[in-house]
Amino acid sequence: MRAPDWLTARPVAHRGLHDRARGIIENMPGAALAAIDGNFAIECDVQLTADGEAMVHHDDRLGRLTEGSGALLGLPSTALKEVRFKDTPERMMSLADLCILVRGRVPIIVEVKSHFDGDRRLVKRMAEVLASYSGPVAGMSFDPDQVVALREMIPERPRGIVAQRDYTEADWPEATRSQRDGMRHLKHALRTQPHFVAYWVNNLPAPAPWIARHIFGLPLLTWTVRTPEQRARAGQHADQMIFEGFRP
């Protein structure tokens, strides 16, 4: 499969088109609707719950942007769907809720969050949800094992690897040293067989994404573009940007 043209056709709103000053919090329904209104693709994160649901949320714990506390992995989806984002009336969505909200109007790029423990239930739930969704969707993850799961469970959807130059134990405490080493330089590419790469903008240019883009023809997204300097770098070295904090 070649990566579809829609993957890079428009800028991608990081966790939706959020703006805390206007009461629009990342990954909440209003952020998705704002991205749709701006005709931007939506990047979102999904986390696994105690009952195997895929919830749209970046952090693996409640509290930074939401009411409540506790790990998502220890809570059922019924409880999480009642969790409100701070200072808003909006509640957390599941991936299925997001698909119903978007209705194929813009692409969705789903980042699969991982505890680097080999658990494939989150991708399994994604596969179940996306089986009945006809809109454009791609999956991606930092964890090569989850990208392999995407390849095996959802082969008909584009998949990508999220990457950067280095992975330290401090920043990636759940990954083993062997896992961190295997994530560097896209060493896993023969195993994961990604259709695209999403690379940290501050690390561009870099040999691995250059080879992926120019030798193997994989589209290169770059994250997270927030400043004019980063936007210029994205324009020079990538095919499209995942952005936040401004409106392209």
Image (cartoon, rainbow, N blue to C red):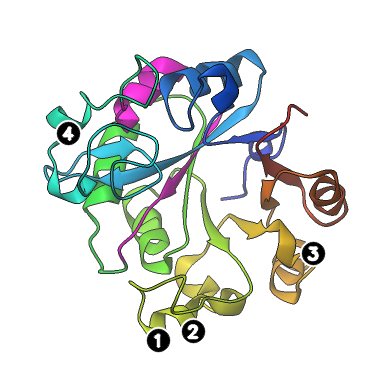
In the image, what residue occupies the spot 58% across and 73% down? 186
- The one nearer the camera, 234 or 202, is 202
SS under mark 4: helix
Do the CB atoms of the residues marked 1 and 2 lie less than 8 Å apart? Answer: yes
Q: Indicate which disc residue 157 carries.
A: none
Q: Which residue is mark 4?
A: 77
Q: Is residue 230 depicted above or below 242 in this figure?
A: below
In the picture of the structure, the residue carrying the numbered disc 3 is: 214
Q: If you read the primary sequence from the N terminus, does the residue marked by circle 3 or circle 1 appear first? A: 1
Residue 147, picture quadrant: bottom left
**Which residue type carries mark 2?**
Asp
Tag 2 residue? 181
- Quote the CA–CA distance across marks 3 and 2: 24 Å
User: Which residue corresponds to mark 1?
Assistant: 178
Span highlighted in magenta in the image: 92-115
Q: State how far apart marks 4 and 3 are (Cα).
A: 42 Å
Q: Earlier in the sequence, mark 4 or mark 3?
A: 4
